[in-house]
Image (spheres, rainbow, N blue to C red):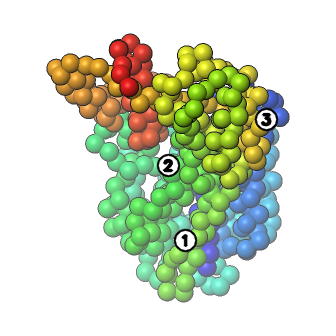
Amino acid sequence: MKFLHVADAHLDSPFLGLSFLPDNEKEKIKRSTQVAFTKMVDYALANQVDFVLLVGDTFDSPNPTPSSQTFLMKQLDRLTSNQIPTYLSFGNHDYMTKQDLLVKENEYLHIFDQEVSTLNLTTKAGMQVAITGFSYEQNHILDDLTSQYPNAVAGVYNIGTLHGSLKTTNDTQNVYAPFTLAELVNKNYQYFALGHIHKREVLSENPLVVYSGNLQGRNINEATPKGFYEVNVSEDFQSTLNFVSTSEFVWQIVPLTFVNEVTKSNLVAEIVDQINAQIEQTTLIEVAVQNSEVLSPEIVELMRDHDFLTGLNKELNYHSLVVRSSFKSQAKIVLSKTDQQFFDEATDSVFTNDALAELTKNIQKKYPFAVDYLNSPDYIEKLKTQTELNLKQRFEVED
C-alpha cells in the first residue's frame, strides 16, 4: 500500500512584501501554490497511490477566491475520477464547512466534520485502513482532542490526521488543537499525519508521527525544501517515507561579504557574482550583508531600494529574484562593564518565547499567524540581530 501525506497547500496565499516586483513575476509567484498542488496530483496519478490525505489549510483563508475553489474542484476531480480516495480536513486557516466548499463529497472524496470521526477503507490489495481526523470550525481550537481519537484496531492500519501543534508551557501558544507526543504514541496507530507546522519533521520513528510541511515555501522563513510524503506500507504494516519535492521555487538567505572597496560602479557586479555562485535553481533571495560596517550609508540605502533590486534581478541566474536585503555588522557596541551586564541580562530575558508572547499578545489576537513566527528560532534570532543593529546606530562602536 502507498498513500500521500499532504498538508498546508495554502492556495490563495498572498505572498506579502513582493508588491515592488513586476506584475508577471508577482503572478508567477502567486500561482506557485497551485503549481505545487498540481505536481502532487500528477504524482498521485502517475504512481497510482491508494489514497491521498489533505491535512488542513488547503486554502489560505476561510473565504477562498472563486478561481481557487474551481482549481481545487478540478484537481480533486482528477483524483476521484481515477478512483483515488481523498480525505480532506479543514485547518485553522481554511476553517469551513462542507457546504462552503464548491466540490461535493462523493464515493472517493471524504471531508471530515468538526467532530473527531473515523473513516474506513479497504485498498485494492485488500488492506484494511482506518483514518481518524477532524476539521476546524473556527481558527482556534484550545482543547486537546487526542483523547477523542479511538485506540488502534488490531489487524488494521490505523492513521490519525491532526492539524495542530505540540503543547508548550505558554497557554497563549496552545491555540491550534494542542497535543503531546506521548498522547499520540500511546494510541498505537501506525501513522500520524500532521499538518500546521510548515517545517518537514519526523517527531517519532516508531510509530511514525510526521509533519509533511507545506507544498511551497511562502517566505524566507520557509527556506527548506517543500513537498509531501509518499508513505509505503508493507504487508506487516512497516512504513517507509519518501519525500517528494513540489516547490516551483525556493527561498534562500544568501550571505554577502564585501572585501574590496565598494562603490556604486562595482556594486551590482559584486552582488551578482556572489549570488550566482550560491544558487542552483529559481530562488527568491534575501541578501544578508555580513559586514555592513564597510558600506557607506548611501550604499546601504541603495541596496534597500526596490528599483535598485529590480534592476539587479535582471542579472541573476535561473530567473531568480532578490526580494529583501538585511544587514549585519561585525562592529561591537562599546559599553561599560556594568552597562554590558545589564545589556546581556536584558537580551536573555526579552528574546524568549514567553517574553515575546507576552509583548505581542495583542498582535497575536489580531493576526493569529504571528504565533508561527514567534515559534521560529530563526525569526527570534533575526529580531535579536535587528535590535542589535538599531542599538549600534545609537551607540559609539569599534571595529
Farthest residue, direction front? 260
Q: Is residue 300 above or below residue 129?
A: above
- Say which quarter of the image contains residue 319: top right
Q: Amino acid at mark 3?
A: Lys
**What's the CA distance linking mark 1 and mark 2?**
18 Å
Q: CA distance from mark 2 to mark 3?
A: 34 Å
- Give the secondary structure at mark 3: loop
In the drawing, does residue 56 fall left or right of residue 363?
right
Disc 2 to disc 3: CB gap under 8 Å: no
Badge 1 density bin: few <14, some 14–19, many ≥20, Cα 10 Å = some
From the image, tell me which residue sits under label 3: 314
Residue 93 showing in the rendered view:
no
Q: Position of residue 262 (x, y in %)?
A: 61, 26
Residue 348 visible in rendering: yes
State which mark lies toward you, 2 or 3: 3
Query: Residue 197 shows which numbered tag?
Result: 2
| 16 relative position to 28: left or right | left
Residue tagged by mark 1? 241
How many numbered circles does the render carry? Answer: 3
